[in-house]
Image (cartoon, rainbow, N blue to C red):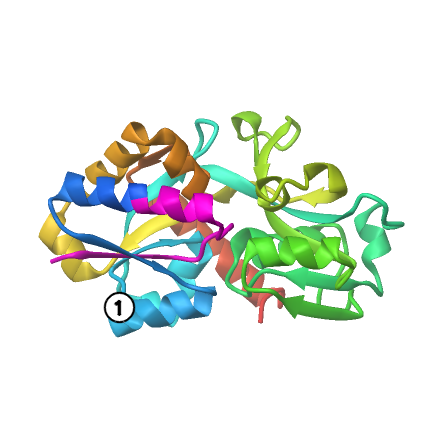
Amino acid sequence: MDLQLGLVPVVDDDRTRDALERVAQSLAKATRRHCAVHRLESPDALCGAFEAGTVNLIWSSPTLALSAPQLGGAVPVGTCIRQGVAHYHGVIFVRRDSVIRSVLDLRGRSMGWVADTSAAGYIFPRVALAAHGLDPSDLFSSERFFETHGAAVLSVLDGTVDAGATFAVFERGDALSPMVRAGFVDLGHQDDVRVILATPPIPSDLFVAAPELRDELGAELTRALTKVARDLPEPFHRVFGAEGVLAADPRSLTELRRQLGDARAMGLLD
């Protein structure tokens, strides 16, 4: 069975496409199977491609992998490692010159999210707002989804919305330490924005496979992903923003399912 790798790129420029092709070639060599790449424009499109069988290995946010009906049969085969840890954070940010100084100033403002399945770009920031005593369901004057982290960042920078949400990676996984990667960092705009809220840790994004692919390759698939990350650190990091891959931890996924259930019960998610 050939590999059909699907993802929604954070940045879809020529350098990233070249890096993705190198990753695909290395993955093909490690698994001794052809590997085709499918760049999708949104999480919904990614789920649709998986359901249709167009892709059988996808890079996904953990919440999408665990909650999307189309991915119900998907099997987690690896989790991304950044700064030595298997978690990251979500952040709410504004333009550097914005009058918004804290989350309290978000009332009546317009908000840009990534997608309603995005852990860092929607779900966890809403939970964090509720923890600050703010009801996200009536906090904003308007809310829009932009489907990718890059588009959400640009919507804030060009003034389409007042604030946005994206992912962030901090040194040693500590939100009090310097930031090393984020949606706006990847686009070269770290100095143009200001973070006003960081969420608690979120389990890292996953590689999930169709059951038949997992059954055919077994643990070889996880080992192949690990090898690609090790052999091609720069291209792998450019595409996935990660330094390595580990086998997915069932305990962290179980805890994430619990948190998602709690958030829905509290009315924080649609």
The answer to whether residue 220 of the structure is visible from this angle is no
Quadrant in which the C terminus appears: bottom right
Quadrant of the image occupied by residue 235: top left
Residue 3 lies in the magenta-colored region: yes
In percent of the image, x 23 and y 39: which residue is there? Answer: 26
- In the displayed structure, would residue 130 be above or below residue 248? below
In percent of the image, x 79 and y 50: which residue is there? Answer: 103
The answer to whether residue 18 of the structure is visible from this angle is yes
Furthest-front residue in this view: 14
| Amino acid on which the number 1 mark rests in the picture | Thr
Q: Which residues are magenta?
A: 1-21
In percent of the image, x 58 and y 66: which residue is there? Answer: 269
Left or right, residue 147 beside residue 113 = left
Coordinates of residue 89 in the picture (x, y in percent): 57, 42
- In the displayed structure, would residue 158 be above or below residue 228? below
In percent of the image, x 75 and y 50: which residue is there? Answer: 132
Quadrant in which the N terminus appears: bottom left
Mark 1 lies on residue: 54
Q: Secondary structure at mark 1?
A: loop
Coordinates of residue 96 in the picture (x, y in percent): 81, 43
Comparing 115 with 134, the one in front is 115
Left or right, residue 30 beside residue 181 = left
Quadrant of the image occupied by residue 222: top left
10 Å crowding of disc 1: few (<14), some (14-19), many (20+): some
Left or right, residue 141 beside residue 178 = right
Quadrant of the image occupied by residue 4: bottom left
- In the displayed structure, would residue 10 be above or below residue 236? below
Comparing 68 with 254, the one in front is 68
Coordinates of residue 178 in the picture (x, y in percent): 64, 27
Coordinates of residue 175 in the picture (x, y in percent): 63, 33
